[in-house]
Amino acid sequence: MSISEVFLAEWDQEVAATRRLLERVPTDKLDWKPHEKSYSLRQLAGHLAQLHGWTGITLNVDEFDVNPPEGGDFPQPTLESTDDILALFDQSTADARSDIAATSDETFGEIWTFKNGGETVFAAPKAGVLRRFVMNHVVHHRGQLTVYLRLLDVPLPQIFGPSADEPDF
């Protein structure tokens, strides 16, 4: 079994669970924040929808500077509704899945470097970056989103098993 096949088996389950959660985001609450220091619901859901886009950046280039010395911004889409969030998520995850499927075992072993302002933040094999910087990052923010939705009294879907709102396994 190739490395991409191993990743894709888990990928499909995680993507489905994340989409079920994003479907619950209420459009009329996108500007809501649980605390002044927190992301708004729009920012958090948008970040979660866009994170899978880091897959192509991880697998198709050898380094990325989030704040390049020569300037340039990472594009931030305008998200006005749950449908916008889901459209971004669907495109992001479809592109990412294709990138994973097309990546050779050799490429997964190549070093990828993350920079900020020209300075190296970390460097690691691409397989590890995909696992930690993309997939685990998604799981982290998905957990945050469950708290946001619970505080808004939005029923939570099953993720790894029954939830209080969907108790039948």
Image: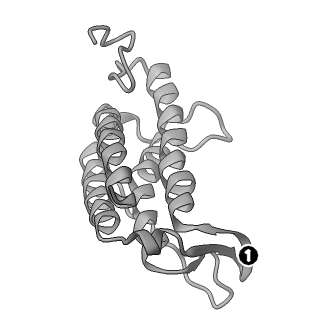
Q: Nearer the viewer, residue 79 or 122?
A: 122
Amino acid type at mark 1 = Thr
Instruction: List the single residue furthest toward the front.
Output: 1
Q: Residues within 10 Å of mark 1 (few under 14, many from 20)?
A: few
Q: Position of residue 169 (x, y in %)?
A: 28, 12
Q: Secondary structure at mark 1?
A: strand
- Residue visible at 44% across and 46% down in the picture: 42
Q: Name the image quarter holding residue 113.
A: bottom right
How far across and down, in percent of the image, does residue 43 sit? 49, 49
Is residue 66 visible in the rendered image? The answer is no
| Residue identified by numbered label 1 | 120
Q: Position of residue 17 (x, y in %)?
A: 33, 35
Q: Nearer the viewer, residue 90 or 59?
A: 59
Side of 62 relative to 20 (left or right)? right
Residue 80 coordinates in the image, percent (x, y): 33, 51
Residue at the right extreme, as displayed: 119
Residue 1 left/right relative to 36 = left
Q: Say how the picture is coloured.
A: one colour
- Give the residue drawn at x 25%, y 54%: 90
Q: Residue at x 41, y 40 (%)?
A: 30
